[in-house]
Image: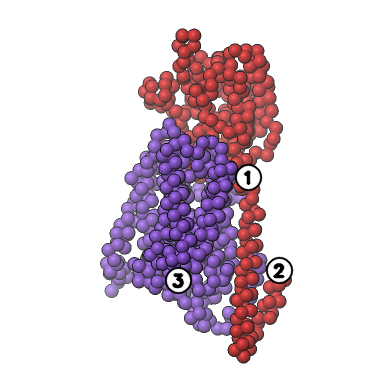
Chain colours: A purple, B red
Amino acid sequence: MTAARFVINEIQSYHRFIKFLMVLVGAAAVASAIRFIFGLGATTNLNDTYPWGLWISFDVVTAVPLAAGAFTLGVVAHVFHIKKLEPLVRPAIVTGFLGYSLVCIGLLLDLGQPQRGMYVLFPWNWNVHSPMFEVSMCVMAYTTVLTLEFLHPVSERFGWHIPLRLLRNLSVPFAIVAAMISTLHQSTLGTFFLIAVDKLHSLWYNPLLPLQFWLSAIFCGLSIVIFEASLVHRYMGQPNESELLSTLTKVIPWVMGAYILVKLFALTTLTDGPLFDRPFLTLLFAIEVIVGVLVPFRMFLNRRIRTDKAMQLRAASLVIFGLVLNRFNVSMFGMIQPDQQIYFPSLLESVVTIGIIAAHILFFVLLAKYFPIFEHHPEAVDSTIPDRIRKIGEHEAHGKVSEA
Amino acid sequence: MSSRTDFSRDKSFLIDMTKCTGCRGCQVACKQWNQLKAEETTFFSGEGYQNPPAMSEHTFTRIKFRDYQKNGQNEFAFYKEMCMHCNDPACASVCPVGAFRKTAEGPVVYEDKKCIGCRFCMVACPFGVPKYQWSKAFPLVRKCTGCYSRVKEGIKPACATACPTAITYGPREEMIKEAERRLADHPDRYLPKVYGKEEAGGTSVIYLTALPFNELGFKPVTMRALPSYTWQALRLVPGIFLGVGGTLSAVSWIQHRKERIRKEEEEACAGKDAACCAPTDDHKEEKP
């Protein structure tokens, strides 16, 4: 059987849903090609009133906090050293790696001059006053870290022993570096909109926006881990991890509580300008805060809900919904001026964004199929490595921790 | 963003809207000097008599019309829309590659060879000035250049040269003084405000009008320089970066130590030897 034949057979054996995802990703690839040939003006509904549309609002501003599971879980499992969470770490890293890779693709699609994307890296262009500069540097750096972390299952799959030893000992420093970089760019995505002083509505505009973006990225990241583990249990035949997840659901209310306090403080004391002068925005704000924050907060406070596998998923889904709505409110709805025309994404923009979401699910399922994403058992793997080498590696790793 | 604090010698426009006749010589001169394409438009396509309907990649400046009644007579009021050439420009502060620059002469210029096309400048500008080449496959930003190439050589900008009545061009300090003198001499003719003296932290385009600014189509803007809004968050970045790193390193060290001690105790209880490398490890880590 030739290689091509083998690949075709393999694809034919996939579930119908996977094939459907492949079609969506294919459509998005075609749409991207059209976008590059004809340009942004011809293919999107962007214009001088709406220089940023769906691609920035979803593919960048929303997708980055949605990919925050890797760094939050990394901190909980590796820095706080809660070893039992280890089975959740690798899927989270794969999700993060896919998420950030797709953010990079989304950014490149949205740039008017994508071939010049690298210019941000040249020191003579550096502009430390630009939030965009900081986010692009952080996203590139963090994508590199995630790629290295992702090499872990890849090396395991192909039996590359030396990278494997190195990576295993670097997991703690990586978790710390990931948290440092993520703190910066998750919050700086909020700083983006601090420049829109007279554009963003007072319901969302306040100087603490970066802090709110960071806090919401943390509890959303943890919710994404819950969401993903629950779906993987339901549809991919993986074991029920709801007991491990209840460790995370214990952390979430603390972060959400802090977020609610910060938001309340910002709205009551740091905001100038009328808050509830536009009914549509008030409605969006109410949905975001009540359905997306207060309800899941209350749910996570309840011990029974916190440990129940179905309720965990529901609460986590509400958090994710709330976060998506919040990022759209800040980057799109809240920026609309009363007398402006309304932006609606074009078909091509929508096809690309749907394709990016589909690509995320598709690649996750495929990676899980061919690489040891779930079958990771650290204690079993450790024993395969000669003691002598492990010790040397350990010393190196400890040195790195204290440097970082 | 810009390191300068003294803008008094910057070349600035003083635009007296009460003296504007609406001839739109400035629009034509701007198109000619910058070799901008004419736009096909229809009358009344925008909010009123103005044409083209908005500033765009082909139109860097534009006269907006507004009709109103004064003593029972129909009157026109005008507003010349253009780049404000802020002292501390938002566009320059947000650009990730530093494509915008406030020149020593006054104009804010854009270097299109650097631009990566993120369009943050368009989101950031409080006046909605930078426009995009939506018609192109690889678009760039276009905006009023303040006729930097002319100003550098000591010539006035094209629009200021063409204007028969309303535009005065010179050092910012003198333009503000002149504006204030006119307000003092003819308080009946003007709204008592020099627009651009403090708007967005001060601009190199200064307006005098008879009608309220919002009625003429001026956008509401803050009196603070816009870059200061983002900088108050961004200046914390290095501290936060190191703070998070330091805190998490400490937490990690403590947690691993706890774990190791627990393990050693367990092993000791079981009557086994403690791991031989543990004491050296401890010693090594206590140093930092």
Residue at the spot 59% in from the left edge and 12% down from the top edge: B188
Q: What residue type is labelled 3?
A: Glu
Q: What residue type is labelled 1?
A: Gln
Q: Which of the two discs, 1 and 2, sits closer to the camera?
A: 1
What numbered label is drawn on residue A243? 3
Mark 2 — residue? B288
Q: Which of the two discs, 3 and 2, sits closer to the camera?
A: 3
Label 1 crowd (10 A; few <14 / some 14-19 / many >=20):
few
Kindly tell me whether residue B98 is visible in this rendering.
no
Tell me the CA gap for discs 3 and 2. Answer: 37 Å
Residue A230, horizontal then vertical, whole percent: 39, 66
Q: In this view, does A345 lie above or below B36?
A: below
Tell me the CA gap for discs 1 and 2. Answer: 32 Å
Residue at the spot 49% in from the left edge and 72% down from the top edge: A86
- The secondary element bearing badge 3 is classed as helix
Residue at the spot 64% in from the left edge and 74% down from the top edge: B257
Residue A20, horizontal then vertical, whole percent: 29, 59
Q: Nearer the viewer, residue A245 or B170?
A: A245
Do marks 3 and 1 both belong to one polypeptide chain? no
Question: Tag 2 or tag 1, which sits nearer the N-term?
Answer: 1
Quadrant hosting residue B157: top right
Left or right: A376, with A138 as reference point:
left
Mark 1 — residue? B232
Left or right: B22, with B46 as reference point:
right
Residue B142, horizontal then vertical, whole percent: 50, 34
Q: Nearer the viewer, residue B40 or B274?
A: B274
Tell me the CA gap for discs 3 and 1. Answer: 42 Å
Q: Is residue B62 above or below residue A70?
A: above
Quadrant placement of the N terminus of chain B: top right
Kindly tell me whether residue B59 is visible in this rendering.
yes
